[in-house]
Image (spheres, grey):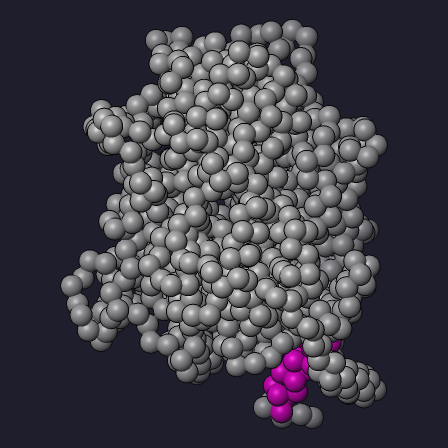
């Protein structure tokens, strides 16, 4: 009896599949289909969130001309290559790979699809269809550092770092240089969480730093809220990164870099559509408009605001360069001699702590 | 110098109590569940859904107490569902637990999208008269929130109930010899349902602690593996609430210690320091198992086995 | 009366059919959810099917995703046959990757036939070492292998991070967390011009080998006795502990092959994002397959298809990643719940007693003695 029922149900199942496969959808393609790969959840109110916001801006600005395909939480593993291939099979002609670990998959996929344009974050590739872009948050972190350096009372500052990779080291070093430019006595302490996102561990790391007597916090995890909220409730000044979350720390917020990818995405898409895209390096810094400074918190006094905004203008106009020689690492070795201005290659390979950071970059 | 080391140790210990609490709730819950013979390895998923529910209810109703209760209620429901699969469908308990984790991760992340960045009144620290003012003890154990203090009561209470009361005897009998228990008039099915539900409710509470007390808001995958650690700690504790406390403090203490060693400027790779909690638990477990080598095994005999009433 | 072979076949058929219905049930339940969020379930499911098995590329990617799951699942199964619950295949996978990477970066070979076997051996030795520790702790002191293997996963991942951020850092690409690229001879051959690689052949050979050896050899017989009743095996003077330790060692070595094939064929270097949880998925696959080696292969294939097909939830249906987990959880729930009915159907000709014996094989190793 039961077996007969099963056979009937099985029949229905296969019939259903037959019907399914006859419904092949055919859509008219827009001018350009763009794929976005991001490494974490877009709900992080941080790094991945900014990418999604940029996508939304792109859709609005180039409505009708551009269609987007978005994939979050794509691991930097065998998955990335598969997802990109599927995006291309769907008709994507431009793909933003928004994590440094995507470069190797991008290299392999791009070799198979010379007609597809790839934009790779933070890493270089000498290929005709791969461009490189940098979200150079360092300038924002420098200004946050200046603000923090002016505001600290104990001259002890804390930084909760994720992984010791160049993009994090730009942030920490720029922050420290900013602090030191106005407050040479201050010291920055760094604690690593070894993850990009683990809210509870971040909070505990922040509390560990607070126990050592710091009164100002910064961080570079891809999620923003846990540390900002913990700082607010502990009465510790805090600056953010990536997304503007000042409303979560009304009393303690200082400022921080904000990434606003939208215009950059639009520009790149326009270039690809106009067939004048070239592989090169796009540096998304303050001058380009992608990097912005978050609004100041209520506690930042007017003179400090003025000072920081003036510095921001100098950075924008190129009069102030963050990583300008002489730069010595925390062990005293000279990394950049006086008068030297580094190129993006130098910055992208950063692997040291500048002076002013309490401790060494642990390597072994 | 001595004062500095003293302060350092107090800070580490206070961090230990804080880090241990969410894991401890889940571990205690799992002890109840496993004592009844049901294995629920889905704590990760239950903690996540609990964490989300806590935030959602606290945000909408503006009551943190209701938020915590709702987290427990949702945990309870997930526990009942697990029990349904394990008791009535005789499903493989390990598999069901993993499915529960995967499902809970997805469900909480999906529903939680609307609650990212919502402001809630988080669970704040509260002082206990006299106790909080004690030197050393005060800052370590009595500078936290209500949920931390609750564990101080919960652990002895659970140990008492399990070892000294009729309810505990029933629970243990169901986990050890379900058929004998049934013959003695115990409702095995009902006991297992209840134990799984209560255990999962505690895990839900542990999850709510993560979001309401720690991160002060919802964040996708906020448990980040703590549910799995809790499952492991039950084995560490050999089903004893007091040993669960030790295990959770050991784990939380190692996390707290490694972060503060970094802050103190210890020049060791953070990745090697990060191994500390895991290695420490294995080493301590090995030593304690070795020392109690001839003690009788405390594994609930019928753990993970389906219960088939008549022969 | 039914003959033994026929009965086995009938059983297998019932399992396949029952599982199919369980999956359909899961899809039906999820369809309600999809309708609620305003998506057409038919279109979504077609997308998943197409993305998993629809064309040769999708099929190849399903195989790629399934390969590490197969090897990890077999690793879990081998330990489980002797009553050892190896939750640590994820860590053993990473150790395999470390072993293979050490050889690839440090041995001056230029021929694949020299390089690959050595990488394979190094990977297997490292993975075996990682499972030997919990195995040894279990058989000598009695430390539960469940917790030690679980915790060693985290240690293994941190070890990889330590190596790629420190001593094994790519000298030409300082500070980015990965090793230098392997030489060309360290690349595991690919099949059919796709990303499918020899790893899948290893998995199938291992599965067939064990499917043949377990029921036919004396070692297989003793293993089964130990797995179903360690006390009886002890009584029969079988060397239970030695067998269990070897099971752990082999288990770790097999799981390590997943790591080896992943770094050698897919990544070409060691990186931290090597495994998005293949070990845990393999663990699930093994339990869904009830530790049967052939079934592990089939279940892994289906899970691989689900993983790779589920991309379309994000790419086409524009649903968040969370829905992938929701659908997966649903499918596994239904599969596990359906077992009871299948068992009833399968045993409808046999006395109920069989069911009990069958069930005894399943419980985790922490369970000893008589129920």
- Observer-nearest residue: C259 or C137? C259
Relative vertical location of residue C130 with respect to residue C346 in this rendering, above or below: above
- Observer-nearest residue: B309 or B259? B259
- Observer-nearest residue: A222 or C288? A222
Main secondary-structure element of the magenta-colored stretch: helix
Identify the residue shown where x is 58% and y is 36%.
A243
**Which quadrant: the C terminus of chain B?**
bottom right
Does the magenta run of residues contain B299? Answer: no
Identify the residue shown where x is 41% and y is 52%.
A132
Q: Position of residue A32 (x, y in %)?
A: 59, 64
Using residue C182 as the reference point, say whether residue C147 is left or right of it.
Answer: right
Please tell me in which quadrant of the rendered image residue C139 appears. bottom left
Can see residue B240? no
Please tell me in which quadrant of the rendered image residue A305 appears. top right
Using residue B27 as the reference point, say whether residue C347 is left or right of it.
Answer: right
Q: Position of residue B33 (x, y in %)?
A: 68, 46
Q: Position of residue C125 (x, y in %)?
A: 29, 61
**Which quadrant: the N terminus of chain B?**
top left
Please tell me in which quadrant of the rendered image residue B160 appears. top right
Identify the residue shown where x is 63% and y is 10%.
B131
Does the magenta run of residues contain C17? Answer: yes
- Observer-nearest residue: B208 or B43? B208
Outermost residue toward the left in this view: C108
Segment colored magenta: C6-21
């Amino acid at each position: 009896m039961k077996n007969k029922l099963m056979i009937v149900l099985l029949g229905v199942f296969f019939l259903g599949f037959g019907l399914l496969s006859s419904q092949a959808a055919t859509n008219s393609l827009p001018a350009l289909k763009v794929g976005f790969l991001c490494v974490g959840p877009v709900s992080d109110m941080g790094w991945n969130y900014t990418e999604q916001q940029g996508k939304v801006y792109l859709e609005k600005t180039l409505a009708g001309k551009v269609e987007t395909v978005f994939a979050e939480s794509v691991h930097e593993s065998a998955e990335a290559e598969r997802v990109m291939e599927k995006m291309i099979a769907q008709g994507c002609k431009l793909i933003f790979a928004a994590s440094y670990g995507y470069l190797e998959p991008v290299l392999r996929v791009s070799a198979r699809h010379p007609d597809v344009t790839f934009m790779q974050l933070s890493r270089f590739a000498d290929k005709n269809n791969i461009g490189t872009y940098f979200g150079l948050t360092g300038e924002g972190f420098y200004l946050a550092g200046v603000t923090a350096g002016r505001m600290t009372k104990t001259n002890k500052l804390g930084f909760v770092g994720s992984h010791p990779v160049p993009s994090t080291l730009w942030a920490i070093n720029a922050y420290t240089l900013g602090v030191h430019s106005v407050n040479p006595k201050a010291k920055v302490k760094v604690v690593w969480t070894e993850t990009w996102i683990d809210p509870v561990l971040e909070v505990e790391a922040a509390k560990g730093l607070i126990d050592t007597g710091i009164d100002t916090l910064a961080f570079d995890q891809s999620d923003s809220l846990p540390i900002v909220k913990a700082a607010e409730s502990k009465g510790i000044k805090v600056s953010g990164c990536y997304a503007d979350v000042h409303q979560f720390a009304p009393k303690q917020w200082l400022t921080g870099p904000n990434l606003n990818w939208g215009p950059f995405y639009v520009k790149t898409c326009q270039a690809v559509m106009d067939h004048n895209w070239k592989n090169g390096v796009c540096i998304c810094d303050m001058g380009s408009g992608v990097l912005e400074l978050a609004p100041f918190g209520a506690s930042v006094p007017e003179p400090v605001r003025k000072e920081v905004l003036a510095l921001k203008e100098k950075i924008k106009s190129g009069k102030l360069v963050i990583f300008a020689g002489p730069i010595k690492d925390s062990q005293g070795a000279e990394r950049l001699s006086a008068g030297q201005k580094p190129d993006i290659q130098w910055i992208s390979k950063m692997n040291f702590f500048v002076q002013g950071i309490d401790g060494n970059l642990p390597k072994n | 110098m001595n004062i500095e080391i003293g302060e350092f140790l107090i800070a580490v210990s206070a961090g230990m109590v804080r880090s241990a609490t969410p894991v401890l709730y889940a571990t205690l819950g799992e002890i109840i569940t496993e004592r009844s013979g049901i294995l629920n390895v889905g704590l990760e998923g239950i903690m996540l859904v609990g964490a989300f529910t806590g935030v959602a209810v606290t945000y909408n109703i503006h009551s943190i107490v209701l938020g915590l209760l709702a987290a427990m209620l949702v945990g309870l429901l997930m526990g009942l569902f697990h029990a349904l699969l394990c008791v009535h469908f005789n499903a493989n308990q390990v598999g069901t637990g993993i499915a529960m984790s995967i499902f809970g991760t997805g469900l909480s992340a999906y529903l939680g999208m609307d609650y990212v960045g919502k402001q809630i009144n988080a669970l704040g620290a509260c002082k206990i008269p006299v106790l909080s003012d004690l030197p050393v003890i005060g800052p370590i154990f009595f500078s936290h929130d209500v949920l931390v203090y609750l564990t101080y009561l919960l652990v002895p209470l659970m140990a008492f109930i399990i070892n000294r009361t009729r309810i505990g005897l029933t629970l243990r009998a169901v986990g050890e010899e379900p058929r004998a228990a049934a013959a003695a008039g115990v409702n095995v099915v009902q006991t297992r349902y209840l134990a799984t539900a209560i255990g999962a409710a505690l895990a839900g509470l542990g999850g709510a602690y993560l979001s309401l007390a720690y991160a002060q808001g919802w964040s996708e995958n906020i448990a980040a593996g703590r549910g799995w650690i809790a499952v492991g700690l039950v084995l560490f504790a050999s089903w004893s609430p007091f040993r669960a406390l030790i295990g959770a403090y050991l784990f939380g203490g190692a996390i707290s210690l490694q972060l503060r060693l970094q802050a103190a400027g210890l020049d060791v790779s953070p990745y090697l320091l990060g191994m500390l909690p895991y290695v420490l638990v294995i080493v301590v477990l090995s030593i304690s198992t070795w020392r109690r080598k001839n003690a009788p095994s405390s594994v609930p005999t019928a753990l993970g086995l389906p219960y088939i009433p008549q022969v | 009366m039914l003959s033994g072979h026929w009965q086995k076949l009938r059983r297998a058929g019932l399992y396949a059919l029952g599982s199919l219905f369980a999956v359909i049930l899961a899809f039906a339940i999820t369809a309600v959810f999809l309708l609620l969020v305003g998506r057409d379930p038919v279109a979504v499911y077609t997308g998943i099917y197409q993305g998993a098995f629809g064309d040769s590329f999708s099929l190849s990617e399903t195989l790629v995703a399934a390969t590490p799951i197969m090897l990890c699942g077999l690793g879990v199964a081998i330990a489980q046959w002797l009553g050892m619950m190896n939750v640590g295949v994820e860590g053993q996978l990473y150790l395999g990757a470390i072993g293979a990477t050490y050889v690839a970066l440090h041995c001056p070979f230029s021929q694949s036939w020299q390089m690959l076997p050595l990488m394979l051996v190094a990977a297997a030795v490292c993975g075996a070492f990682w499972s030997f520790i919990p195995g040894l702790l279990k058989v000598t002191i009695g430390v539960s292998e469940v917790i030690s293997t679980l915790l060693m996963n985290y240690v293994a991942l941190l070890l990889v991070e330590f190596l790629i951020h420190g001593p094994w850092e790519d000298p030409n690409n300082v500070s980015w967390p990965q090793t230098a690229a392997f030489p060309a001879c360290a690349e595991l051959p690919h099949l059919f011009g796709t990303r499918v690689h020899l790893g899948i052949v290893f998995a199938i050979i291992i599965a067939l080998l064990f499917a043949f050896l377990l029921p036919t050899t004396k070692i297989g017989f003793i293993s089964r006795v130990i797995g179903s009743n360690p006390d009886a095996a002890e009584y029969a003077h079988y060397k239970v502990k030695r067998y269990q330790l070897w099971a752990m060692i082999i288990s770790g070595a097999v799981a390590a092959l997943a790591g080896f094939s992943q770094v050698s064929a897919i990544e070409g270097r060691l990186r931290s994002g090597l495994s998005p949880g293949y070990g845990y998925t393999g663990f699930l696959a093994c339990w869904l397959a009830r530790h049967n080696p052939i079934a592990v292969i089939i279940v892994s294939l289906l899970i691989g298809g689900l993983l790779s097909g589920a991309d379309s939830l994000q790419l086409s249906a524009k649903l968040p990643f969370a829905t992938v987990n929701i659908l997966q959880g649903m499918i596994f729930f239904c599969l596990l719940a359906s077992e009871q009915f299948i068992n009833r159907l399968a045993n409808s000709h046999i006395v109920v007693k069989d069911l009990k014996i069958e069930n005894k094989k399943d419980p985790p190793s922490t369970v000893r003695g008589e129920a």
